[in-house]
Image: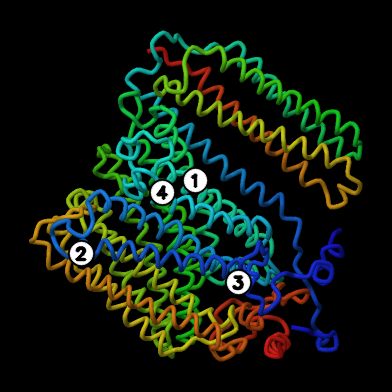
Amino acid sequence: MTSTKYDPRILKTQHPVPGAPDNWKRFFTFNTDAKVIGIQYMCLALIFLLIGGLLAMVMRGELITPPADLVDPSVYNGLYTMHGTIMLFLFLFPVLNGFNNLLIPTMIGAPDMAFPKLNAAAFWLVPVFAIVLLASFFVPGGPASSGWWSYPPVSIQNPLGHFINGQFLWILAVALSGVSSIMGAVNFVTTIIRMRAPGMGYFRMPVFIWTAWAAQTLQLIGLPALTGGAIMLLFDLSFGTSFFLPEGGGDPVLYQHFFWFYSHPAVYVMVLPVFGIFSEVITVYSRKPLFGYKFVALASFIITFLGLIVWVHHMFYSGTPQWMRNLFMVTTMLIAVPTGVKVFAWLGTLWGGKIRLSTPMLFVLGGLINFIFGGITGVMLGTAPIDIHVGNTYFVVAHFHYIIFNTIGFGIFAGIYHWFPKFTGRMYYEGLGKVHFVLTFIGATLNWLPLHWAGLLGMPRRVASYDPEFAIWNVIASIGAFMLGVASIPFILNIVSSWVRGPKAPANPWNAIGLEWLLPSPPPAENFEDDVPTVISEPYGYGLGKPLVEDQNFYVRRSMEA
Amino acid sequence: MTTTNTDLPLNHQPGHIKHDGHNLTGFIIFLCSESIIFLAFFIGFALLKTTAPEWLPEGVEGLETRMPLINTIVLVSSSFVAYFAERYLHQKNLWGFRALWLLTMAMGAYFVYGQYIEWSELEFGLSSGVFGGTFFLLTGFHGLHVITGILLMALMLLRSFRANNYDKGDMGVTSVSLFWHFVDVIWIILYLLIYVWQRTT
């Protein structure tokens, strides 16, 4: 009924799309083009990776010697709280939303998101809550200092009595981040359900789309619970209620349930799209179809489901009853099954493939090794007796950094390199990329591998000073951390210089199969415009010689002519 | 990027994907998500109510139920009025729609007013232990949704006077009406939890 009115051709003539090529100013405006928003998300997130990383290096500088000599212990509390919060809410979620924005419409053949304005609004909320969060460094009493999980009763202490304090701003920023993420999630899920190209049934979607869908479903289910808990925490902190205060009949453990009901699945929100990136990259650089595609796709939603019923494993030492410990121990172990399915599918794809070790593949292989290691320590920590023994030690810190940075971070770098030519239209420098990988892999391993030993020996987390017996592990870790800082130099150099004056990228530099590679580099504002291809075969048909879409040659020729 | 029709091979039909028509899908997804926040509050309320050593603050006997019951009846029946308003719209009876839609808004406003009267007569406040905190949190958060619903309905009412407003269908009205039913269902659960289930000790 409205097809003529909303025909993209007419749209273009009536309202010129602001994302005209070679106009860098569009990245600083309220632009509704998903590809512009995607790049906005990514660049902002990478700036916050540097800020969060800087805080981490101050902490590692402090921990290189046993006494608290570089920064005051109370400052240290603020540092780890803000490091965690910035890395999660201002680096990881935005950078993955950047991938969602760039890849979802192009991979499914949609012209844009289902709700472009909502999409832009969700992005512009990020700088708003970033300012709110960073402002907390300048309020009396300093930033929030109760850790990124903000457990009461510690988080509802307000010794200076100011209404606007670090914790207040922290809760406000997290709530705004939640609003932004929900806006994003509604958009992504609607787009995936409603705007796929003709012929793209659910089992013809690339795995990245499956994983993004599964991850955003988790956001929709989990995030409101955290928001509910945060609202109650804010009332306890600022308006005199006692939801989490035992004196007024409240229950501090209730907050932990709210918090972890979201924040455990939040790990899957971050890791699932990275599993998608792994699947995309491994197939391209081993020139083989994805082993067990349907199982990999479905495993995403099994992880979503199981991810929602494991949160109490973060609370084994919070006075939870034994039946609860047993129940959640079993569900936690079950997560290893769908994840194992994925790992074996990737190994099966690699097996006998024509492997090409370019930068994205190196990051994926490094990330995969780290993921297997982090996954094993994860199963260890899911066991109640081990968890109670090593809970709140550096073993936990080492484990989750193996997942958050050494897996998710590696996957993000792989994704950035892999799709860099597609969305910037320029090739990156392979040599610098490899330097980046080598420095990152060695730095990350030196940083977090030794901390497992420190943790097993009993070094507690979140302390500015420690017993000299742990000194050796911390010295190695700090060297690794500084190396990671150095690793950002070739990365920034590579991205900036390639984008400015790198060689022009062809439409399909990696000979990859997928709708996004049938578009010119960079794709035009409306992607396939009014000529969306019809998908006729399963994704990842490497070496099978079957075309992905009807009239493939037409699209290939068109993408090369641009 | 620029293609002329002469490039098109014969076996290839140009096609595109619609930009619009996804509002209802998006809104339903949003409502599912929004219901989780209430679910979290309800579960928190039930846990606190069953485990708190002392539930009622000193000097409070319990909650008066007559006035809230009238409020409940008004709000629940407003959902049916909204349904009939929507039916009128489908039958292209614009004035019938506007009248019933306005009635729905009036009933919602009466509910908010009744809630305000109840709040002002209570002898406990937000900081009266978990009893006071949860009471004001739940009723207040729900009240915000009722007010949002009334504002959205006002917007739809104004837009109904715009020419050709329903050329693209009446998804806005359908979504708001869905929101209103949602707010209603939440209130029924809330009423059962807070007013019907009384814990006296």
Mark nearer the viewer, 3 or 2: 2
Q: Is B165 situated left or right of B68 in this image?
A: right
Q: Are marks 1 and 2 on the same chain?
A: yes
Inter-mark Cα distance, 1 to 4 = 15 Å
Q: Do labels 1 and 4 share a chain?
A: yes
Quarter of the picture holding the C terminus of chain B: top left
Which chain is home to disc 1?
A
Which residue is drawn at the image coordinates 40% and 45% (left, top)?
A: A139
- Disc number placed over residue A175 in the picture, else none: 1
Q: Where is residue B122 in the image (x, y as percent from the top left)?
A: 52, 13
Which chain is home to disc 3?
A
Inter-mark Cα distance, 3 to 2 = 43 Å
Which chain is home to disc 4?
A
Q: Mark 3 or 2 closer to N-term?
A: 3
Q: Name the residue under label 4.
A: A136
Mark nearer the viewer, 1 or 2: 1
Q: Name the residue under label 2.
A: A451
